[in-house]
Amino acid sequence: MKKTFKVLSALLSYPDEALQKAAPELRHVIDEEDLLPPENRRALDALIEDIATGDLYALQERYVELFDRTRSLSLHLFEHVYGESRDRGQAMIDLKSLYERNGLYLSTSELPDYLPAFLEFLAARPLAEARAQLSQPAHILTALAERLHKRQAPYEAVFQALTSLAVSAPDAPTIVAPEGQDADPNDFAALDAQWEEEAVTFGPGAAPSCKDRIVSQIRAGRRPAASAPKGMAP
């Protein structure tokens, strides 16, 4: 088990008091495993400090504004790919099956493409396999890092760390960023026309394939932020 993936999963969870109190443990895990280059660790330290010392209500408001109300920052990976096509449904089934074959069972309120859940799955895999799996959505992670950078959001640190953990960096041509600002989250016609990205699948031999329009927002119940720190013991 590589606990660094669980730390990154926790940092992308909805902030609460348990996550704030877990800050020293999160730092310890990152330092102890030493999987990340110094620049990534410094940026993550800054994010952890920001979460640990910030006003909880302000932290929660920022999180919702970024990841719930901003379409292009969704933490549901397949939202950036499939829309409501049959391909999306099959991709969800395939990813859920991959989890279950390896001992991870999601609650009924969770979708398998939710990034914190995907990172919990990777935490339980051998490091080489986890890095290979992480390389498959790397073009999406890179795009999210760039968008957070433009907003000067400290969560950029998590996505920069993830891309550094991937086996190889994504090719620039696979990234298609939206033009201008995100559409009003209630303006579904504007959201439908806003942007597309390369498709992504998971598992052995998976590779980018077709493109589909993004036509809906998917939200699922989140894992409590405390679950990752509490489960860090091998």
Image: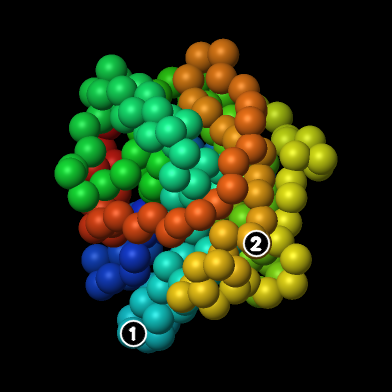
Q: Give the CA separation, mark 2 to mark 1.
A: 30 Å
The answer to whether residue 40 of the structure is visible from this angle is: no
Q: Position of residue 5 (x, y in %)?
A: 44, 41
Q: Nearer the viewer, residue 216 or 198?
A: 216
**30 horizontally vs 121: left or right:** right
What is the quadrant of the C terminus in the image?
Answer: top left
Quadrant the N terminus occupies: top left
Placement of 11 over or under 16, stated as above or below? above
The residue at 56%/20% (across/down) is 206
Q: From what the image shows, is residue 193 above or below residue 151?
A: above
Is residue 28 depicted above or below 70 in this figure? above
The residue tagged with tag 2: helix, strand or loop? helix
For badge 2, the amino acid type reads Gln
- Front residue of 142 and 212: 212
Q: Is any atom of residue 179 visible in this view?
A: yes
Residue drawn where x is 74% and y is 50% of the image: 176
Front disc: 2 or 1 = 2
* Residue placed under numbered mark 1 in the picture: 57
229 or 65: which is nearer to us? 65
Instruction: Tell how many labels.
Output: 2
Closer to the chain start, of discs 2 and 1, is 1
The x and y percentages for residue 141 are 61, 47
**Residue drawn at (63%, 65%) of the image:** 148
Three-letter amino acid code at disc 1?
A: Tyr
> Residue 205, position in %: x, y?
56, 13
Q: Residue furthest top?
A: 205
Residue 104: percent from left, percent from top: 25, 30
The answer to whether mark 2 and mark 1 are in CB contact below 8 A is no
Which residue matches tag 2? 194
How would you rate the neighbour count of disc 2 (Cα within 10 Å): few for under 14, some for 14-19, many for 20 or more?
many
